[in-house]
Image (tube, coloured by chain):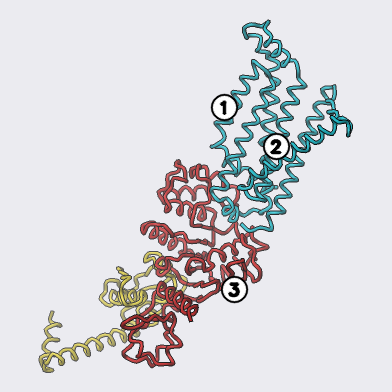
Chain colours: A red, B yellow, C cyan
Amino acid sequence: MENILEINGLCKAYDDFSLKDVSFSLPRGFIMGFVGENGSGKTTTIRSILNMAKIDSGKISVFGLDSVTDTIAIKERLGVVFDSLYLAEHLNVKQIEQQLKPFYKDWNSEEFFRRIGEFDLPDNRKVGDFSKGMKMKLMIAIALSHKAELIILDEPTSGLDPVARDELLDILSEYIEDENRGVLFSTHITADVERIADYVTILHNGKVWFTGTKDELTESYAVIKGAEEDIPAALKEKLIGFHAYRNGFDALIKTDDLAGLPDTLEYEKASIDEILVYIAKEEKHERHS
Amino acid sequence: MKIVIKNKSELPIYEQIEQQMKAQILDGTVTEDEQLPSIRQLARDLKISVITTTRVYNDLADEGFIISVSGKGYFVAPRNNELLRERMLFEMEDGLEKAVTNGRNAGLTDDEIVAALRKFMEG
Amino acid sequence: MKDILKIMRFDYLTARPLAISPAVIFVVLAFALSLFFAPLICSYITFSAMVFVIPLQGVADKSGFNKLYGTLPVKRGNITRARFLYIFLVHFAAEMLELVLAVTAMSLKLYRVLPNQNGEMMQMVRESFEDTTLTLLMIIGVFTVSCLIFSYMEMMGQIHGRENELKIILITLGSLSALAFGILTLAQREIIPTLKLPSLPATTAGKVTLGVILNIVMLGICLLFGEITARKLTKREL
């Protein structure tokens, strides 16, 4: 299966933060949820893909092209949705279309205005007056109008109301019906990716904590609960984000480690959200001990 | 075909869909040879991941409920399909076994259980 | 080059809705005044070039055009170069318009309809309509100064950040006036020979040539500033 996006050993150091050996890949035809708490390195990774940040080492290829040397050819076929609108706020949709049109070989004005109509966006109002959801839809309409094969979304849902978030999922579901396309969806609202994402990459402290299919992720981890004294000594080592309280404990555990679990301990499947929370707890724990 | 996904269900999404599709194939809501939506269409309609719908179709095909015709898509398997027949027999036996166990647990005699079954069959 | 044209078009379309009405007001006002009082007032049209530059810089910063530029399929350096060429071109367009309108004003001589033709003021007005050299000097001079200042500020703003712009302007103005003051003082005390302003060529052809040379030099300076800025910025991240 051809990868529409492939990152190998990406390293990038800043004074106060660094990406360490980030590697993951997204096959053509699928949606990847790119999750992790704020500051985990999602945006830096995306800026590296766009060649906006200069990578220290590693290799990123998009459509099989190199992100540094072929960045222009890549951007011709790439749609990007940021958390805020990057267009001139005093212009209306028509004026924006005029502005962007010449930059893309495959720009299709008809398609653009069809999308604008479909998304219920007024074409004569200043885009600065648009609601957050409308701005997001405008950026998607732009991506769809130059036949982008890969759409990268950087926290598009932060600050969006549930209706607009649901609309976004609708749009992405429709987009990915074409199996030649791909979506990289960065968010810290995991409910958005829980349903539609095929693949999930979890970033934590600039490192890849997990990457693979979503089913693999949710089937590999479970939340375990019970009384602290019931935990076998061998198991205690393997618990992630162990959290004890007055009447018991809870923690994340790999499902492989569930064998031989005493009946007094209960477990249930873990959501991506829970996994993220336990990863964060585990780190705090390490810092304290 | 009608499929309802409950986010709060204990069952994973793929199992929810499989169960509902099987039920509708078995009770004839969807007729044999009927074409099913493509993997990507179904994913879009239900707003779920493509990998999930792929898994559903693969599982259903393995169990003989649906067949994949290359280049055309997925279809409900014909009734005389051996696999499907076996599957149905298995489901029936499974149901009967449960019925007998429950009946006995409730203190019914075997005759009473058979009578209850006969009553069911007469409608 | 294609990239640069696309970006200039983009910048122009960004500035146009904000700039068009003040620009028209400047043009109409300056032209109306120049028709009756002095053709050199046309040089005020340079302000309409400024209104095509200043709001653009503001919008670009406020809307985070850097993010947009990061997604567009164009070379980073060309985005910077385009901005400088844009500054030159809006100034150049204003200058051309000024010349056309000034020549129109001079040939119409509408001051003749004003009352009190024999007054002292009217004497000055009449002279200003005769003095082609001064009008020309004013128009080309204002163009050169404004274009120089704006392209220099763009360079400093992009390299050092807009927030430092005022500081940079003050430092630049300060050092320039200190330098001028120094030279004047030294010349007065006859420590260095008195500077003589080069006199303008006497012929019309000579004046036109000088004007063309000044414009070409200005274009060169803008391109140079653009190149310097582009080189500096490519090392930086968006």
Residue at the spot x=48%, y=53% of the render? Answer: A141
> Label 3 is found on which chain of the structure?
A
Q: In which quarter of the view is residue C98 placed? A: top right
> Mark 2: few, some, or many residues within 10 Å (few <14, many ≥20)?
many
Residue at the spot x=56%, y=71% of the render? Answer: A3
Asked if labels 3 and 2 share a chain, the reply is no
C116 relative to A260, above or below: above
A196 relative to B118 in the view: left or right:
right
Which amino acid type is marked by label 1?
Ile
Q: Which mark is residue C187?
A: none
Residue located beneath label 2 in the image: C147
Name the spot of residue A15 as percent of width and height, x first: 61, 66
Q: Secondary structure at mark 1?
A: helix
Whole-number angstrom distance, CA of label 3 to CA of label 2: 47 Å
> Tags 3 and 2 in contact by the CB under 8 Å rule?
no
Asked if labels 2 and 1 share a chain, the reply is yes
> Mark 1: few, some, or many residues within 10 Å (few <14, many ≥20)?
few
Asked if labels 1 and 3 share a chain, the reply is no
> Label 2 is found on which chain of the structure?
C
Q: Nearer the viewer, residue A147 or C212?
A: C212
Name the spot of residue C165 as percent of width and height, x first: 64, 45
Whole-number angstrom distance, CA of label 2 to CA of label 1: 20 Å
> Mark 3: few, some, or many residues within 10 Å (few <14, many ≥20)?
some
Q: Secondary structure at mark 3?
A: strand
> Tags 1 and 3 in contact by the CB under 8 Å rule?
no
Q: In which quarter of the view is residue C38 placed? A: top right
Q: Nearer the viewer, residue C211 or A95?
A: C211
Q: Which mark is residue C25?
A: 1
Name the spot of residue A69 as percent of width and height, x first: 68, 63
C1 relative to B100, above or below: above
Q: Which mark is residue A20?
A: 3
> Does any portion of residue B47 appear in the rendered image?
yes
